[in-house]
Image (cartoon, grey):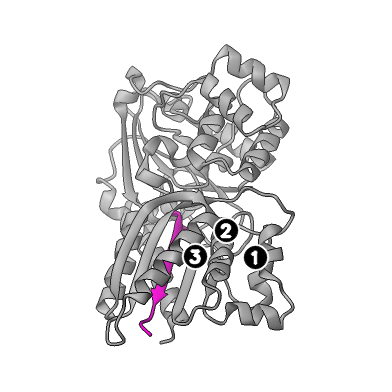
């Protein structure tokens, strides 16, 4: 197996273990007696619903997933909507979901299925704020380089369903939420902007974030934030009937990839699953680390594999097509400067890097040579945030289609001794 093929195999393993059909059933109790209602949102929510019905049989409910991510369900309604910028379909689906849960009682049981992407898909702007204003703010935040936790604080305080408000909407029913984590540190309040989890941030925090990143703030948004929001504090009594369970996380996928690599004779170093920061800067750091490790290897040593996860960011300066994983790979290739024996992959486990239908890219000692032959200047591509176009032109994109899960970014650097 070539180095690049090995890297792709490791990525595929990381995705496989996060597939709801492989693991969700372990966290389901026996189907409760009485009325059971399933709600959910996220890129994996339809697959999660499919897994629930495989275990429980047909269920009543509604989940919202990304266009192209629907799965066949027996009773649960699946609605597709836009991600990462919300649309009218998501708004109408969320309104329908909230209408469905209005009549629930303390004798009812709600199962919530939440995964990454729920922030955009479960969209219910606070009173006085339009969908168009939410779209504009979301688009600006995505381009600002703001970390996902700060973006989610803003999203919560401009919403009627995030920040614990879904939990209070289904109260007094019993609520169990099964979550796939795509956030650093697996903080429940940040997964999908925490619709089933309380949050102690304030509307002023959200306003400060928007001002810090120089986001244009419509008058309606500023008025709303100054008046307060519906975000539910963590000590709210209505949350006592809620149980949040993270059943799939980046650490699980990285461990599965590490175990597979070790079985193939690689020395594995896990750098962590909570790495954040600017993609191009983290790439420079990991390139230097890889070269330092290689310099210390004897020819007879086993190859070394560096694994990491987390969510990197891109502060857009150009007008190209790129995402944090592809930009990481492009910056890494530039920093390695065709160093022999070092290969890498960086992909989003949901199959969508940024807003492109591309998971990520592969890098090897031949990357810059391929670019030169194609007349593709890597520095220009990086300056224009055009990493996806760069790797498309040299045939090194990783395209998976919908993976039906989402445990954040996966990065692996394979270092051969010289």
Q: Could you tell me which residue is drawn at 40 percent across and 21 percent down?
A: 233
Q: Quadrant of the N terminus?
A: bottom left
Contact? badges 3 and 1 (CB < 8 Å): no
Q: Give the number of the disc on residue 353.
A: 2
Does label 2 or label 3 sit earlier along the sequence?
A: 3
Q: Residues within 10 Å of mark 3 (few under 14, many from 20)?
A: many
Q: Secondary structure at mark 1?
A: helix
Q: Is residue 45 visible?
A: no
Q: Which residue is mark 1?
A: 388
> What residue lies at 69% left-to-right and 67% top-to-bottom?
389
**Quadrant position of the C terminus in the picture:** bottom left
Q: Which of the two residues, 131 or 396, is positioned nearer the viewer here? A: 396
| 158 in relation to 353, above or below | above
Give coordinates of residue 126: x percent, y percent.
60, 23
What residue span does the magenta drawing correspond to? 403-418
Which residue matches tag 3? 346
Mark 3: secondary structure? strand
């Amino acid at each position: 197996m070539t180095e690049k093929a090995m890297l792709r195999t490791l990525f595929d393993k990381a995705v496989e273990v996060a597939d709801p059909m492989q693991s969700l059933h372990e966290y389901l109790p026996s189907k409760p007696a009485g009325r059971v209602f399933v709600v959910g949102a996220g890129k994996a929510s339809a697959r999660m619903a499919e897994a629930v019905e495989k275990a429980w049989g047909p269920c009543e409910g509604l989940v919202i997933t990304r266009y192209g991510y629907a799965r066949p369900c027996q009773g649960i309604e699946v609605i597709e909507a836009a991600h990462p910028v919300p649309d009218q379909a998501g708004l109408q689906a969320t309104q329908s979901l909230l209408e469905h849960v209005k009549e629930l009682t303390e004798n009812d049981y709600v199962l919530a299925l939440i995964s990454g992407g729920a922030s955009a898909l479960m969209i219910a702007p606070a009173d006085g704020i339009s969908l168009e204003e939410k779209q504009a703010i979301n688009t600006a935040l995505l381009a600002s380089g703001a970390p996902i936790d700060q973006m989610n604080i803003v999203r919560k305080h401009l919403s009627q369903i995030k920040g614990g408000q879904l939990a209070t909407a289904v109260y007094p029913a019993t609520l169990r939420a099964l979550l796939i984590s795509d956030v650093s540190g697996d903080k429940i309040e940040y997964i999908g902007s925490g619709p089933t989890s309380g949050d102690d941030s304030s509307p002023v925090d959200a306003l400060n974030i928007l001002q810090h990143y120089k986001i244009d703030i419509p008058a309606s948004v500023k008025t709303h934030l100054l008046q307060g929001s519906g975000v539910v504090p963590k000590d709210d009594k209505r949350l006592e009937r809620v149980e949040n369970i993270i059943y799939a996380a980046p650490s699980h996928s990285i461990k599965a990839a590490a175990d597979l690599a070790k079985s193939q004779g690689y020395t594995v170093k896990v750098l962590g699953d909570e790495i954040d920061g600017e993609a191009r800067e983290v790439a420079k750091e990991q390139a230097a680390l890889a070269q330092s490790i290689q310099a210390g290897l004897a020819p007879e040593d086993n190859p070394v594999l560096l694994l990491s996860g987390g969510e990197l960011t891109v502060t857009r300066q150009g007008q190209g097509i790129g995402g944090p994983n592809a930009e990481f790979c492009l910056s890494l290739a530039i920093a390695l400067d065709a160093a022999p024996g070092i290969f890498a992959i960086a992909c989003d486990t949901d199959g969508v890097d940024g807003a492109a239908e591309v998971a990520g890219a592969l890098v090897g000692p031949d990357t810059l040579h391929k670019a030169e032959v194609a007349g593709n200047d890597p520095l220009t591509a990086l300056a224009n945030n055009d990493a996806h176009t760069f790797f498309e032109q040299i045939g090194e994109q990783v395209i998976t289609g919908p993976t039906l899960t989402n445990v954040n970014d996966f990065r692996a650097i394979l270092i051969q001794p010289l």
